[in-house]
Amino acid sequence: MKLLVTGGAGFIGSQFIRYMSAKYPEYRIVNLDKLTYAGNLDNLKELDAKANYEFVRGDIADGGEVRKLIGEGGFDAVVNFAAESHVDRSIEDASIFVRTNVLGTQTLLEAARQAGVGKFVQISTDEVYGTLGENGYFTERTPLAPNSPYSASKAGADLLVRAYYETYGMNVNITRCSNNYGPYHFPEKLIPLLITNALQDKPIPVYGDGLNVRDWLHVRDHAAAIDRVLHGGKPGEVYNVGGHNERTNLDIVRFVLTRLGKPDSLITFVADRLGHDRRYAIDATKIREELGWEPSIFLEQGLAETVDWFVDNRDWWTKSRIGENNHGA
């Protein structure tokens, strides 16, 4: 199989490439990434010498470039991770998110359709469903109700993917995951931000009362789920991917502080984010029953390993560009 992975220098995309390269050494993988602030080729240094891996710098919204790459590439599948993904940044400027997440996805879809690519997998997010109350779970039948410009742009991309299945009969799948965590996570998101701030004895900003609930999924488990969807997903279907690890943001912050031996006094509550979703929770029954996937990494184990990775890899995260408005999830 020959794969085009877009956004493969980012956190989740690079994990997927490392996972697939190790599991399927006979596969050929081309990584198309624009290398914006969150893209980091250091995430994939171990693959530089491999003949079956190739990096191409480019923009998924550049129609000419994408048509040429896909038209001449002979790809069996496209897996689209490329996206602007930070909610705070989308609140400041939504236009970048519409261009990359909506136009970029449509550009990839059309190029893949014209080239006769056999499979298109869109990597989405549970945020397209909006927010939950104290009870209940998102299923694949939950109506889309995005509350931020970021999640609205991802919902728009998902609808385009669905339209290409319904209109053109393309073999597509959409995965919608809960919050990911793990090594190589860019330090503007909650977990890497709080780890790196704590290591420097800097204040840890927490939105509102800190009781917003997220379902946490280790990035390695996410890569394994995408592998199952790529190889076995039914055409046109959506698959939710969750970790069954619901915790409040304060739970996560206090776990990390305890792991690092740092005081709770580092916690600094800040004004709540605009349109801040209160709770996300995924029902992953469908992917478990249809494709046999379920998470294998318990949160406490995976989070402890993640904290230790950041402790041991200070050079990696100190070189990363950390944005100014970093307040977590």
Image (cartoon, grey):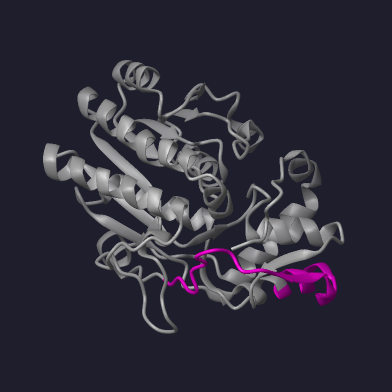
The residue at the point 28 percent across, 26 percent down is 111
Q: Where is residue 97 in the image (x, y as percent from the top left)?
A: 46, 42
- Is 41 on the left or on the right of 3, as rendered? right
Whether residue 325 is visible, yes or no, is: yes
Residue 104, placed above or below residue 188: above
What residue occupies the far bottom of the structure in this picture? 135
Comparing 320 with 269, the one in front is 269
- Is 66 on the left or on the right of 286, as rendered? right
* Magenta stretch contains residue 258: yes
- Is 299 on the left or on the right of 108, as rendered? right
Q: Where is residue 132 in the image (x, y as percent from the top left)?
A: 41, 75
Whether residue 229 is visible, yes or no, is: no
Task: Look at the image and tell me in which quarter the N terminus lies.
Answer: top left
The residue at the point 32 percent across, 15 percent down is 72
Q: How many labels does the image show?
A: 0
Residue 26, quarter of picture? top left
Residue 98, placed above or below residue 136: above
Comparing 268 with 297, the one in front is 268
Task: Look at the image and tell me in which quarter the C terminus lies.
Answer: bottom right
Q: Position of residue 168 (x, y in %)?
A: 13, 37
Residue 138, quarter of picture? bottom left
Comparing 68 with 272, the one in front is 272
The residue at the point 36 percent across, 64 percent down is 129
The stretch of residues the image draws in magenta is: 254-281
Residue 71, placed above or below residue 272: above
